[in-house]
Amino acid sequence: MSVAYNCRMKRRDLTKEEKEIADNLKRIWLSKKKELGLTQETGAAKMGWKSQGTFGQYINGTLPLNTDAKIKFAELLMVDVTDIDPSMSVPAATPTIPLLDLDVVGKWIPEGAPHFVEFKARIPKPQGYSLGSKAYAIEIEDNSLGDLAAQGSQLAIDPDSPPEHGKIAVFYLPDHGETHVGVYMSRAGKETLKFLDGSDSISLKGAICCGKAKVRLAEEL
C-alpha cells in the first residue's frame, strides 16, 4: 500500500515588524491606486513582474517585503520608501518625477488626478523646490518660449500651483484635444497663452490648467 505525502512547505508567518510594514503598504496602496489609475495587474507590469500573484501577496501581507520590493513599491506609488518601512531611515531611491510628452499631459491632469500613463523616463526630482505629488516634467521641442526656455530644455511643472501672469504654464484645450505650453497672460478678465516665436496667442476660454512651470535646469522660474 502506497502513501502519498504532501511535501509542500508551509509558508512562515510574518513577524510583527513585517506585518506592520505590510500594513503600511496596503494602506498606501488603497489610498493611492485610484489616484494613480493602477490595478494589481498594471502595477505588477510597471514593476517588471510577469504576473500579479507576487504583487498581491505583498499587498495582502502573505509574503514579507524584501528591500527591492519596498523600493519598487515606493517608486510605483510615488511615496518615500520610509512611508512603507520607517526603519529605512535613508531613502534607498532618489525621488523622481515622470518626463511626459506634451500630448500625454492632457490625459494626466484634466480629471483632477495623475492617471498612470506611459512616460518617456523618470528624472530626479529637483531638490529645494516645493513640488506637489502630481508634478511632472516636459521637454521643450521648439523655440516658442524664446529665451525663457530654449529648445531641448526641461521644465518641472506643478499642477498644484495656479498659473501666474507672465509665467510659463501648461494648458489643455478639450475642444481641440490639444495641450500647449506658453506664457500665461491675464488682462481685463481675458486669459490667453502667449508664444515668443511670433505665433498667434491662444484663447484659454474653456481650457484646463495643467500646472505652472517652476523649475528649469535647477533654476526657479
Image: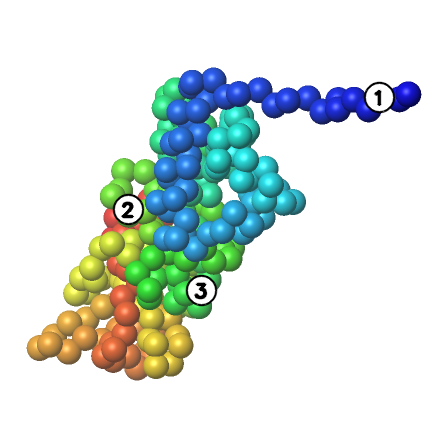
- Whether residue 34 is visible: yes
| CB atoms of marks 1 and 3 within 8 Å | no
Residue at the extreme right of the image, as rendered: 1
Q: Position of residue 24 (x, y in %)?
A: 38, 32
Q: Residue 95 or 53: which is nearer the viewer?
A: 53
The residue at 75%/22% (across/down) is 7
Hey, what amino acid is under mark 1? Val
Q: Position of residue 151 (x, y in %)?
A: 42, 62
Identify the residue position indicated by label 1 in the image. Answer: 3
Identify the residue position indicated by label 3 in the image. Answer: 104
Q: Earlier in the sequence, mark 3 or mark 2?
A: 3
Q: Which quadrant would residue 130 be assigned to in this image?
A: top left
**Marks 1 and 3, Cα distance to the nearest angstrom?**
61 Å
Q: Position of residue 153 (x, y in %)?
A: 41, 56
Q: Residue 114 or 26: which is nearer the viewer?
A: 26
The residue at 43%/50% (across/down) is 98
Q: Residue 118 or 94: which is nearer the viewer?
A: 118
Label annotation for residue 131: 2
